Image (tube, rainbow, N blue to C red):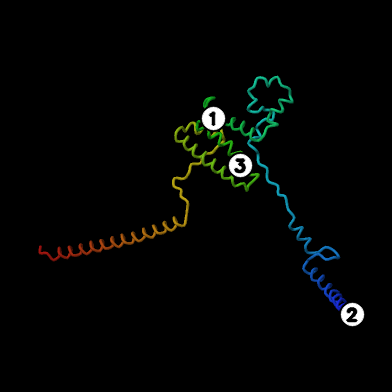
Amino acid sequence: MAALRRYGEMLRSVVAAVTPLALRGRSRLGLATPGGKSSFLQPARDYAKAVNKKRQEIPSHLDDLSPMMLKKDYAKLPVMDKVDDVVRRMLSLEMASQKEKVQIKREQLADKVRLSPDDHDSLEVRVAYLTARICTLQEHFHQHPKDKVNRRRLLMDIDRRKVLLKRLRNSRYDAFERTCQQLGLEYVPPPLHSRRITHRWVAKKALCIKVFQEVQKLKAQERLKQKQEGARAATVQALQTEGSPV
């Protein structure tokens, strides 16, 4: 028992001697101590605090739609003139979803370039439908710039509209001008020669330039040789003319 008592007193003395050194080391490292908060971790937490960045608002292409306008399925019903204001408000664009508003907008754009009421598949109408879809995707991508799926759809729709505009421009130029004017589009023709630059293309171009320069050197040597032969022949002919009897 005496040996165990002495062993316990020795452990208590060692712990009492080591505890101040451990607390001092924790305070130097910026760790929390029993007496209070650390002076190092608190500025780090304040530094890593999240900041909400406000995105710049852009005008929507649906702003010109009146909220009192009826939805597409109820606009041409004759019974809508007899309903009360509550029902009319529920069936108006004020209670409509984004998809329903986009459908009305695309029909408005199509009506600007449509040749007849039954025209639903001409080049002008297809360009108007793609324009409404592109405007919607542009607004979505401005709010969600990391949405790669819709970004790919946006680029595909832009390329598809370029193809339709090019086809319309080559077939009916007057309709092409009217479509661009009504939809507010600016057609920029592609360059005559366009090619994606790759390492293989750069190496091939450097080789072609080197071959061209070598061919030019060979042609220059050939021209110099022909010039020297011509000068030598002229000299021999002049000497023969001078040595001949009169």
Question: Which is more N-terminal, label 2 or label 1?
Answer: 2
| Along the viewing direction, whichever of 34 and 81 lies nearer the viewer | 34
Q: Residue furthest front?
A: 1
85 shown above or below 8? above
117 shown above or below 62? above
Tell me the crowding category of disc 3: few under 14, some 14 to 19, or many 20 or more residues within 10 angstroms, Cα based.
Answer: some
Residue 220 percent across, percent down from the top left: 31, 61
| Drawn side of residue 213 relative to residue 149, left or right | left
Are circles 1 and 3 on residues that touch, CB within 8 Å? Answer: no
Residue wearing tag 1: 113
Residue wearing tag 2: 2
Tell me the crowding category of disc 1: few under 14, some 14 to 19, or many 20 or more residues within 10 angstroms, Cα based.
Answer: many
| Along the viewing direction, whichever of 165 and 81 lies nearer the viewer | 81
Residue wearing tag 3: 138
Are circles 3 and 2 on residues that touch, CB within 8 Å? Answer: no
Tag count: 3
Q: Rounded to the nearest whole Å, what is the CA distance between mark 3 and mark 2?
A: 85 Å
Which numbered disc, 1 or 2, marks the residue closer to the eye?
A: 2
Which numbered disc, 1 or 3, marks the residue closer to the eye?
A: 3
Q: Rounded to the nearest whole Å, what is the CA distance between mark 1 and mark 3?
A: 22 Å
Question: What's under tag 1, amino acid-wise?
Answer: Val
* Residue located at (44% from left, 45% from top): 192
Q: In what element is the residue under mark 3?
A: helix
Question: What's under tag 2, amino acid-wise?
Answer: Ala
Q: Quadrant of the N terminus?
A: bottom right
Q: Rounded to the nearest whole Å, what is the CA distance between mark 1 and mark 2?
A: 107 Å
